[in-house]
Amino acid sequence: MNESRQPVTREELDVALERYMTKNEFGAFVQLFMKEQERLAGNLSAMGERLVGLISASEERLRVDIGRAARVAAEEHRRELRVLDDRYRDLPGRVDALERGLREHVEDAAAHGRRPRRRR
């Protein structure tokens, strides 16, 4: 089963190799690829910088919003405490008056007369 092969002609070889790049075409392709890679890297870098800027701006807005919310909450807290303070502001004086009245009552023996007994 020795098949003898005929030598390939130059035309047949050219047709068979047409689908492949030449060395010069490959070099041009590599240069084009490198330029595109640089362009994409530049775009990616710019997008990254924009993203960092957006994140920084968002963080700043968030800080401002949190600060405002904290001030509002603190003011509301102070207002609620003021209401409690106003409601019980006179409490020490009222307690003193009650203690004074109790002391006078305890010290006044006449106020402690005998209570009438209950009849059964």
Image: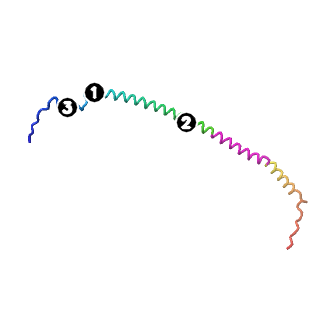
Q: Residue at x 45, y 30 (%)?
A: 46
Which residue type carries mark 1?
Glu
Q: Secondary structure at mark 3?
A: helix
Which residue type carries mark 2?
Glu
- Residue 91, position as x, y percentages in the image: 79, 49
Which residue type carries mark 3?
Val
- As drawn, 45 above or below 97: above
Q: Which quadrant of the figure has residue 43?
A: top left
The residue singled out by tag 2 in the image is 59
Q: Real-space Cα distance between discs 3 and 2?
A: 63 Å
Choose the circle earlier in sequence order: 2 or 1: 1
The residue singled out by tag 1 in the image is 25
Q: Nearer the viewer, mark 3 or mark 2?
A: 3
Q: Which mark is residue 3?
A: none
Q: Which quadrant of the figure has residue 105?
A: bottom right
Is 79 left, or right, of 1 in this rendering? right
Is 103 left, or right, of 46 in this rendering? right
Q: Main secondary structure of the magenta part?
A: helix
User: In the image, which residues are magenta?
Assistant: 69-90
Q: Which mark is residue 15?
A: 3
Neighbour tally class for label 3: few under 14, some 14-19, many 20 plus, Cα within 10 Å: few
Q: Dots 3 and 1: beta carbons under 8 Å?
A: no
Neighbour tally class for label 1: few under 14, some 14-19, many 20 plus, Cα within 10 Å: few
